[in-house]
């Protein structure tokens, strides 16, 4: 028996073609003379199409079962986020970068990928693998990793740190190129960390021990190397390590180092002068700028009549170029900020004066302590003149100092040893301003994506291992963010400014994306973290159907499909 489809077709006067199908259940046989015949057993036309399809399948020998009874979803595990990170890590050759294949490398690689998509403590990460709440643990063979395995992998990675960073330097740093270095810190929990110390906290955690770490990047901000220092290390001291790493560990003899004004000091410049091939780009501090602007000095506002920057020389800086820059937007912002801080300080000082006038505060020493706390709170004490005596307190603004500072609002001076034919004035300013890329890496590492802080380890090498894992996860995240920029609010078409001093502007394409909250193709735009969370909803299903065990991915949403298209691959079923 079989199901035949017949029917009739005709075209209406209006040209529309209509079909009226007929489904017949028929039996094929041969008559007494052996001739093939058909017998119609039933007209199935009135049945639903699903019933007709089921009857056809049955007549072909297939077994039909009840879907609810035979179909079971055994497990649904988040997969899309770790798959995206693994795809990018594979493109970067991250596993090979870490070292030869071994158990420690597998666990270290899993720690890096996990940090990029789910930054939690090492113990929480190991439990995440063990619980099967991600496909990463099973696919990478680390689901059974113990705490000892995790710490062994960290120790193994620290032992290979110099080799890993040497490979990254070979990729992204070249002879005669530009490298950027900056220092940051994170506070430490507990009181037994071997590297913890009291120093200048970039996290605003006063009175807390911390460790410091210096990050070396290429000119685009790709992390290349990281070094951990005790918590009381100064910026200039850490910069010496960066020079040693570049020349001794990486074998690069010609390099332009970029660092901020607190990093590349006069002493460090003297050290760099002794090294052939090492140039620098930094900026002058406020007192040095004020000296250049003194009567008869080369730094005069007339320099900026037609351009926002101008190049000068000065005997105090032999063999160097000074590029003076004036940013009107920055000038207005500084003037506004100073006015607000002066007003806030004046209001607080008025409270002290009322307390003295009311007789509640009479001792000169106590008045001085109270007033000192006020003027130090907003860092504008140099702009006030205080008169303190027994039962007496008055204050006034130092208008001369305020005017002198205001005259230099928005002015900064780039200092460089690089010759004009290698890097012109605009290029030197741009190179210095590119330190923003290192600051962005610190935001990614410390707060936005990787949650480096606070530090809970207390052995020095474990702290180094933790920071190194975060640096490598930052390297991975840097490339992931760039690849997925189309689906986030990142500006992919930053317009070239009229000059390097002009503040950056968002492109028209980015403004349109901001306003519409959708890509030109109609897909919703989100933050990078929200995109990772959405990718995690792409799960791998373990399905039991009629006794068979099947692994299938959920159908990607348009955003998920586009994300993997941007990564240049279909969604992989496994991470192997």
Image (cartoon, helix red, strand yellow):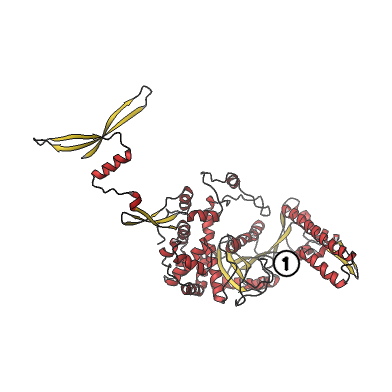
Classify residue 442 as left or right of residue 28.
right
- Give above or below for 69 relative to 398: above
Residue assigned mark 1: 317
The percent coordinates of residue 94 (x first, y second) are 47, 64
Q: Is residue 289 visible?
A: yes
Relative vertical location of residue 363 with respect to residue 521 in this rendering, above or below? below
Q: Nearer the viewer, residue 322 or 543?
A: 543
Instruction: Answer above or below: position of 510 versus 572.
Output: above
Visible in this render: residue 250? no
Q: How many residues crowd mark 1 within 10 Å: few (<14), some (14–19), many (20+)?
A: few
| Helix, strand or loop for disc 1 | loop
- Residue 111, position as x, y percentages in the image: 49, 67
The location of residue 329, given as percent across then percent down, is 72, 52
Q: State which quarter of the image contains the N terminus.
A: top left
**In the picture provided, is 133 more to the left or to the right than 213?**
left
Residue 424, quarter of the rendered image: bottom right
Nearest the camera: 321 or 14? 14
């Amino acid at each position: 028996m079989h199901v035949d489809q017949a029917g009739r077709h005709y075209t209406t006067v209006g040209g529309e073609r209509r079909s009226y199908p007929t489904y017949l259940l028929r039996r094929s046989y041969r008559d007494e003379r052996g001739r093939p015949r058909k017998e119609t057993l039933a007209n199935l036309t009135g049945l639903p199409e699903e019933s007709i399809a089921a009857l056809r399948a049955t007549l072909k020998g297939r077994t039909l079962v009840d879907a609810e009874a035979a179909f079971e979803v055994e497990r649904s595990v988040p997969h899309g986020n770790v798959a995206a990170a693994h795809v990018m890590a594979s493109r970067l050759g991250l596993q090979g970068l870490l070292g030869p294949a071994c158990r420690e490398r597998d666990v270290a690689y899993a720690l890096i990928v996990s940090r990029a998509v789910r930054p939690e403590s090492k113990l929480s990460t190991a439990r995440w693998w063990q619980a099967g709440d991600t496909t990463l643990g099973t696919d990478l063979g680390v689901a059974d990793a113990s705490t000892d395995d995790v710490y062994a992998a960290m120790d193994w990675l620290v032992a290979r740190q110099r080799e890993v960073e040497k490979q990254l330097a070979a990729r992204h740093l070249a002879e005669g190129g530009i490298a950027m270095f900056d220092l940051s810190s994170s506070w430490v929990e507990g009181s037994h960390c071997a590297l913890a110390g009291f120093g200048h906290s970039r996290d605003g955690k006063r009175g807390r021990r911390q460790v410091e770490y210096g990050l070396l990047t290429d000119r685009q901000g790709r992390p290349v190397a990281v070094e951990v220092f005790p918590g009381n290390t100064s910026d200039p001291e850490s910069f010496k390590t960066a020079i040693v790493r570049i020349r001794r560990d990486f074998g690069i003899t010609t390099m332009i180092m970029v660092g901020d004004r607190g990093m590349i000091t006069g002493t460090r410049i003297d050290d760099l002068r002794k090294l052939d091939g090492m140039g620098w780009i930094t900026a002058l501090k406020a007192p040095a700028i004020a000296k250049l602007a003194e009567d008869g000095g080369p730094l005069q506002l007339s320099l900026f009549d037609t351009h926002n920057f101008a190049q000068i020389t000065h005997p105090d800086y032999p063999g160097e170029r000074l590029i003076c820059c004036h940013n009107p937007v920055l000038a207005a912002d500084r003037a506004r900020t100073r006015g607000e801080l002066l007003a806030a300080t004046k209001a607080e000082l008025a409270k002290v004066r009322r307390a003295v006038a009311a007789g509640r505060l009479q001792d000169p020493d106590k008045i001085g302590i109270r007033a000192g706390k006020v003027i130090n709170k907003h860092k504008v004490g140099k702009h006030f003149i205080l008169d303190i005596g027994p039962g007496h307190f008055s204050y006034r603004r130092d208008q001369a100092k305020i005017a002198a500072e205001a005259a230099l609002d928005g002015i900064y001076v780039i200092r460089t040893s690089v010759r004009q034919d290698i890097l012109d004035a605009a290029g030197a300013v741009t190179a210095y301003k590119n330190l923003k890329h290192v600051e962005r890496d610190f935001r990614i590492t410390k707060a936005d994506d990787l949650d480096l802080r606070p530090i809970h380890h207390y052995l020095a090498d474990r702290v180094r291992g933790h920071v190194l894992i975060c640096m490598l996860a930052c390297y991975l995240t840097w490339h992931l963010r760039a690849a997925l920029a189309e689906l986030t609010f990142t500006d992919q078409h930053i317009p070239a400014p009229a000059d390097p001093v002009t503040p950056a502007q968002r492109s028209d394409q980015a403004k349109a994306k901001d306003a519409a909250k959708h890509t030109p193709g109609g897909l919703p735009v989100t933050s990078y973290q929200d995109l990772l969370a959405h990718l995690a909803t792409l799960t791998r299903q373990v399905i039991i159907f009629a006794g068979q065990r099947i692994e299938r991915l959920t159908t990607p949403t348009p955003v998920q499909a586009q994300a993997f298209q941007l990564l240049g691959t279909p969604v992989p079923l496994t991470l192997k």
